[in-house]
């Protein structure tokens, strides 16, 4: 039984993240709202999870890696990779307040629709949007394996997330969610939500532990 994403790894700088993918093709000139949203979302993130094994509970970290999408993409996109919890032998995994935490494995590609295409104050407008969040994204394509932790990845439900709605929002200082991740060193604390068309919902608290 193992949980290969433990807190010790984070404390000692042992968390390893995949190399950033090449940046997608970017328009020339000042960045627009889409550029700013995709750039803001990028980073190497950790999300706390508690897995219960026959010999006791162990706290670990789920890894979520957001990088620029491939330059061959028809749209400007970010790639979001969900790394296998690798909680072999776990009875179940839960969040800090006891809610079920599924294993999520795979990658999706997301974009952000510009609401102000001709704005000459894109950076100021986007800063305001971040402060008053959430920032909305749409999944262009991608499938994820989603299901009970401790189960073989190949047997998990294969969910098509194309067309799903995703949000990222800054966790407010002093909130219950901020307290749940307060012991994790990082530069940003975000709340991630994804709603697939089949009703599958993912909700994670993320702490940025590596810039992208």
Image (tube, grey):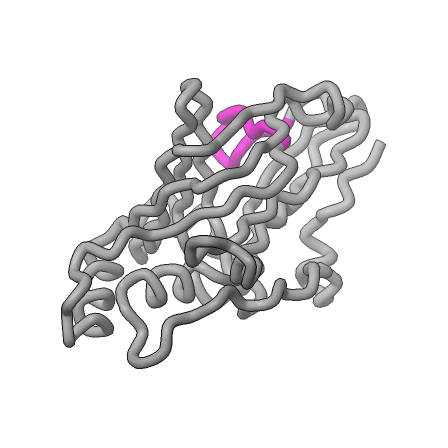
Magenta-drawn stretch contains 124: no
Q: Residue at x 59, y 43 (%)?
A: 107
Q: Residue at x 54, y 49 (%)?
A: 80
Magenta-drawn stretch contains 94: yes
Query: Is residue 8 rendered to the left or right of residue 195?
Result: right
The rendered magenta stretch, by its main secondary structure, is classed as: loop
Q: Position of residue 179 (x, y in %)?
A: 41, 50
Q: Residue furthest right?
A: 1
Tell me where the magenta segment starts and ends, as one range: 93-103
Relative to 81, say whether 58 is above or below: above
Q: Position of residue 186 (x, y in %)?
A: 51, 64
Q: Residue at x 60, y 67 (%)?
A: 22
Q: Position of residue 177 (x, y in %)?
A: 38, 45
Q: Residue at x 28, y 51 (%)?
A: 113
* Quadrant position of the C terminus in the picture: bottom right
Whether residue 109 is visible: yes
Q: Nearer the viewer, residue 201 or 190?
A: 201
Query: Is residue 152 rendered to the left or right of residue 203?
Result: right
Query: Is residue 116 rendered to the left or right of residue 20?
Result: left
């Amino acid at each position: 039984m193992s949980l290969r994403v433990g807190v010790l790894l984070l404390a000692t700088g042992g968390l390893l993240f995949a190399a950033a993918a090449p940046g997608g093709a970017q328009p020339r000139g000042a960045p627009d709202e889409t550029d700013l949203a995709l750039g803001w979302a990028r980073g190497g993130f950790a999300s706390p999870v508690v897995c219960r094994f026959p010999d006791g509970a162990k706290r670990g970290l789920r890894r979520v890696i957001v990088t620029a999408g491939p330059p061959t993409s028809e749209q400007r996109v970010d790639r979001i990779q969900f790394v296998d919890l690798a909680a072999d032998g776990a009875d179940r995994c839960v969040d800090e307040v006891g809610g079920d935490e599924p294993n999520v494995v795979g990658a999706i590609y997301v974009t952000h629709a510009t609401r102000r295409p001709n704005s000459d104050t894109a950076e100021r407008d986007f800063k305001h949007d971040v402060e008053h969040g959430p920032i909305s994204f749409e999944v262009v394509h991608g499938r994820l394996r989603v299901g009970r932790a401790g189960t073989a990845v190949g047997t998990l439900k294969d969910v098509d997330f194309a067309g799903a709605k995703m949000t990222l929002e800054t966790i407010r200082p002093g909130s219950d969610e901020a307290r749940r991740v307060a012991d994790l060193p990082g530069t940003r604390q975000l709340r991630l939500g994804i709603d697939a068309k089949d009703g599958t919902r993912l909700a994670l608290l993320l702490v940025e532990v590596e810039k992208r």
